Image (cartoon, rainbow, N blue to C red):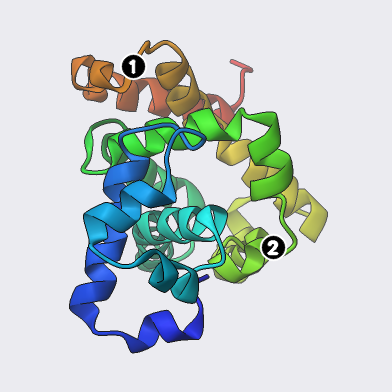
Amino acid sequence: MPKEIFFGIDKEKQNRIIQAAIKVFSSHNYNDSSINEVIKLAKIPRGSFYQYFEDKRDLYLYIAQKIMQNFRDDFFKELDEQNGDIFATVKIVFPKQIHEVLGGEYSNFYYYLLQASFMKDFRQKEVKSKDNSKHGWNVKQDFDVVYKMIDKEKLKIKSRSDFDMFIRILITPFIIVITDTFLQMKHESDIPKIDIEEKKQEYLHKLEFIEYGFSK
């Protein structure tokens, strides 16, 4: 999370820094992206950057959180509108997110984010930092909200541990579709070649097995 001073500067400057960071992190993998590039694009002194952020990790996780916040907001809004019907919710929200990840404004960022998630050093030093909760990645808190909102009468859930297992299984088809697609690509320039509608249908087909099972 940016330091408090960052939120005190004018919105135009904040946005300039954020957009510069998104452009840099969408053009290179995490290791090859540099603070110097962000500083140059944002037109700020190097000293100012460290007044606003601790380091590259701090900036990167903040940008990732901002980009993914729309998905989280959309998910909770749709779950409320669907009266807690979790399957009805994911059938609407996840196909939209597949379109966003594979063909939206930030598709290149997601492409490199997936690459970063496979880097041993990134996983250990960046993602698993004790301070990650400050970036809005509090998974337990999100699970708590969903648990309170879902219609449990429609699910065979007997305990909170059952629910946690169910949610992890529920998101698996989405992760598989996105991960397999990106792993098959040689470069982010391959993204426009993807048949996104086909990927949505692939996701929904996989989801059917969770909703209805494999038994005839």
Depth check: 121 or 177 in front? 121
The residue under label 2 is which amino acid type?
A: Lys
Which residue appears at 32% of the width and 39% of the height?
26
Question: What label sits on residue 187 in the rendered view?
Answer: 1
Nearer to us: label 1 or label 2: 1
Residue 100 in sight here:
yes
From the top left corner, tell me how far across and down residue 109 is, in percent.
35, 39
Say which label, 1 or 2, has the lower sequence index: 2
The residue drawn where x is 40% and y is 73% is 48
Disc 2 target residue: 140
**Residue in the foreground of this view, choosing between 198 and 16:** 16
- The answer, for residue 156, to whether it is visible in the render is no
* Residue 198 picture location, percent across and down: 27, 18
Left or right: where does residue 167 sit relative to residue 18? right
- Residue that protrudes farthest toward the bottom in the picture: 8
- Label 1 element class: loop
Residue 78 x, y percent position in the rendering: 36, 61
Mark 1 crowdedness (10 Å alpha carbons): few <14, some 14-19, many ≥20 = few
Which secondary structure lies at badge 2?
A: helix
Q: Is residue 56 above or below residue 79?
A: above
